[in-house]
Image (tube, rainbow, N blue to C red):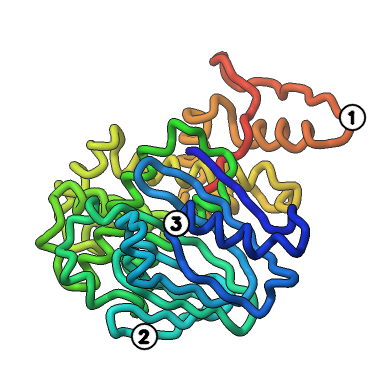
Amino acid sequence: MIETVFRCEDLPRADRFDFWRERMAQLMAPMEMTSDHTRDFRGEVRILEFGAASVWPTRFREMDFRRTPKLIRQSDPELYHFSFIQEGNLQVSQSRQEAAHSAEGLYVVDTSRPFDCLAFGGPPAGVGLEIPKALIPVPHDRIDRLLARPIPAREGVGALLTGFLTRLAADRSLRPSDGPRLGTVLIDLAAALLAQAVEADDALPPETHRHTLALRVQNFILRNLSDPELSPATVAAAHHISVGYLHRLFRARDTTVSAWIRQQRLDRVRRDLTDPGLLTVRIHELAARWGFAHPAVFSRAFRAAYGMPPSDYRHLALVSRAPGATPRRPVRRDTRPSAPPTAPVTS
């Protein structure tokens, strides 16, 4: 992942708004911009490049920006720009369609068509996503009727896309090599969302369907890890697919459904074992919270995954956090080699 950051606060107040206009024109597309806050403009953008897709965590003062026919003739990057609003309000119009958007709102505009966007009622903040139009395998004339209109962001593929965007914007541990792979996921999710919105699922390639379905399945599993009845059969039934097809989805990712569920549960119990605030909670209760109905089954799975019993893991992790403490390794109950616990995995 390649990251570019610019913020107006680093400049003298008199230069901030002009700087913002110039940078946005270079990085997105030329636009006319006006604001009542030009004397003390504040704005910050991080641009995260994931292959052909780019993610834009953004915050700025209230303003109006327009993409005119003249500016389109001057320069057109031919992009679809998605905006997921986390704070503030925006009034957006494009292709004779106009809509107001507030927190948790999601919409898309086309840089090849004129649009007008007014940010009002407080500084807006959110996450944008830009994807070349040529990479979206949905008929563009069908997407036209979605431009500027609200797209569901709290359910279905919309929830997957906005959740993924939010996590990417917050994750500071990604490496450049992660970019292309994550970009493919972003493009697939965006294409699936548009196709769903225009009822054009048949226009999507089979591989995009599979990627999107796999992400839906994984999201469903993560939301239901605490259910001890979670199984390949219940997951398949929830998505109206056969258990065999579900297994094929995970086989493409070099794992099995049951193994992936078990590992996600173990990761979360391992995280809880390192939390001092949960020290008084018994280990079998922590395991039960994440769907392990049988303590003995959990203990065997934990030992197999991490090379030591969960009680030893908790002791090492918590003692090592004590100021000035030198952790002592507990007495081993078996002869297999072990390693000190690594940092807890978070979802």
Callout 2 crowding tier (Cα within 10 Å): few <14, some 14–19, many ≥20: some
Q: Position of residue 229 (x, y in %)?
A: 36, 58
Labels 3, 1: front one: 3
Type of amino acid at the residue the image marks with label 2: Glu
Q: Position of residue 45 (x, y in %)?
A: 58, 56
Residue at image location 39% in from the left, 64% down from the top: 82
The answer to whether residue 216 of the structure is visible from this angle is no
Between marks 2 and 1, how big is the CA–CA gap? 61 Å
For the residue pair 247 and 121, the one nearer the viewer reads as 121
Between marks 2 and 3, how big is the CA–CA gap? 21 Å
Q: Earlier in the sequence, mark 2 or mark 1?
A: 2
Vertical position of residue 342 compared to residue 346: above or below? above
172 with respect to 147 (left or right)? right
Q: Residue furthest left?
A: 202
Type of amino acid at the residue the image marks with label 3: Met
Q: Specify the label residue 104 is tagged with.
A: none
Vertical position of residue 198 compared to residue 193: above or below? below
155 with respect to 101 (left or right)? left
**Residue that label 1 marks:** 324
Residue at image location 42% in from the left, 78% down from the top: 116
Residue at image location 38% in from the left, 65% down from the top: 71
Q: Earlier in the sequence, mark 2 or mark 3?
A: 3
Callout 3 crowding tier (Cα within 10 Å): few <14, some 14–19, many ≥20: some
Vertical position of residue 84 compared to residue 75: above or below? below
Q: Specify the label residue 28 is tagged with.
A: 3
Between marks 3 and 1, how big is the CA–CA gap? 51 Å
**Residue that label 2 marks:** 98
Q: Position of residue 50 (x, y in %)?
A: 41, 43
